[in-house]
Amino acid sequence: MSVDSFFLRAQSLELDRELKNARIDKIFMPRPTEIVLALRSLSGNVRLMVSCGGSNAGVYLTSLRPENPPAPPMFCMLLRKHMQGGKILSVDQPEGERLLVLTFTSTDELGRVSEKKLVVELIGKRTNLLLLDEEGIILGCVKKVDYDMSDRAVLPGLRYRMPPRSDKPSVYGKTAAELAALLEGVQEADDIMDRLDGVSPQIAAELLHLGYDADRLGAALYDLTQGSGRPYLIRRKGEDFDLSCLPMTRHIDGESILCESFSQLMDDFYSTRRAADLKKNLSSALRRTLDNHRSRLERKLGKQRQELLTAQKREDLKKKADLINSNIYAIRSGDSKATVVDYFDPEMPTVEIPLDPELSPQQNAQLLYKRYTRLKNAEEALQKQIDQGEQELAYLESLLYELELAGTEKEIRELTQEAQNAGYVKKAQSKKNKPEKPGVIIPKKYVTSGGFTLLRGKNNRENDHVTMRMAKGGDYWFHARNIPGSHVILVCEGREPAVSDLEEAAALAAFYSKAGMSNRVPVDYTRAKHVKKPSGARPGMVNYFEFKTMLIEPKDLEEI
């Protein structure tokens, strides 16, 4: 990413103009590495995103309204204590470093007003967010660094120190002529970075690509240190690739698009990336847990099915016991085998049955009967366990499918809560982390070409709601056969739908299933009165009867 010191220099000037004297009304912390400040500025109410979250790190005005966790983190509470109600005095980039400092007024419990600072370090993997008091003492930070991790400790109670500087001359604080003298004879981008501190590889390569000599290099770098950079979005092969404070002409397959402001550039660029990272970070642990449960359950089912096959061969034991009893007169105690006529075979062949010589013929027969009875009982228990395991496996598959579809923090948190209730995820022990109250269910609505309303649940909880609470007995219920997916209800209201309406409902159920990308999907449908939820069944799990199956091409409908 090209959010280098020159980018930050120009951006800090822009933010300083827009945020000077802005009042800090509210503070939120939607993620552990980012805060959102709700500000009241001269231009109106705005939101400032302050993120030290790796690839999405930056400070910019945002149109995003991120969802907040049920309880604010401790660092958020600290910021509210010191920042809420204060005014932003300035936004600076000290000493040309890759960090921004928001200076603001703060009023303590006794009414004393002081100036404090919020420092945002944007230094690659060492990005951090720190709150300093008026003496420069660290009050709190997002990432704590002790002396075992670095010579520059970052801990509450310590005095804040700037990141260590390079021994090379800084590009900042010099005239164009001084910079030109230092750059005399450079040929490669690495030469510029070897002679000056604070120049990124992208900027160095671009200036050399333009054919600048030492004088023009010095003038260009001096202008950048004064904040002459402008917000450019760099696209390559038609996709958003990078940010820059200069147009990048060295990419043959690229283009540079000038944006209205640095905030608008960063907000647009990071929005998609943030959503993808958010889903990955929040859902990865849950997906890993569910995958592990699924793998263990599949192995368990495999063993049970193998045991079931063994149990189903029990009739041979009963047959041998019967043959021993029918030929008991011809078998002597101490024999290791019995040669008998198989009366069960029409050809009545002679067969040999192994015996335990330490047991009498009657005891050998009783032993076979006991083994037969034990396997018969085992078959019944195994079949019941396999049925329960297959139902649980189907439920796990539905959770994993819903996790793929979840696009918001709230949806992922609801899935995590459902997994906790099912016993797949350990519940938090802290009393402060109370379960989040489920929101009001508003199912997705569609209209068929015949004017019939369709209702669709997007997760197990909504599927239960639309099927068991909203659907009337005469409505039609649709679901992809033996595949995780949405329940779809065709609301009849006393009318009889045409075949085209049924097909559109089935196509919608197929589209919002795990097989939604297939050419044809089997979809079961029946009247809602034939759909029942067994007592104690998992969310979204139902039984249905008197159904028909339609092989349909998945198709989405326009939502109303």
Image: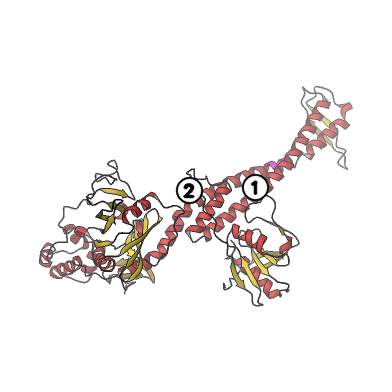
In the displayed structure, 497 sits above or below 439; it is: below
- 430 with respect to 106 (left or right): right
Q: Which circle, 2 or 1, is nearer the viewer?
A: 2
| Residue count near mark 1 (Cα–Cα under 10 Å), binned few <14, some 14–19, many ≥20 | some
For the image, the number of numbered tags is: 2
Q: Nearer the viewer, residue 59 or 293?
A: 59
| Mark 2 and mark 1: Cα distance apart in space | 32 Å
Q: Residue at the spot x=80%, y=28% of the render?
A: 364
Q: Which residue is mark 2?
A: 433
Quarter of the picture containing the N terminus is bottom left
In the displayed structure, 155 sits above or below 11; it is: above
The answer to whether residue 480 is visible is: no
Q: List the single residue furthest toward the front.
A: 110
**Amino acid type of disc 1?**
Gly
Q: Nearer the viewer, residue 503 or 451?
A: 451
Circle 2 SS class? loop
Q: Was residue 332 drawn as part of the magenta stretch in this picture?
A: no
At which x and y percent is residue 10? Answer: 24, 67
Q: Residue at the spot x=47%, y=54% of the render?
A: 70
- 363 with respect to 188 (left or right): right
At which x and y percent is residue 132? Answer: 26, 51
Most frequent secondary structure within the magenta stretch: helix
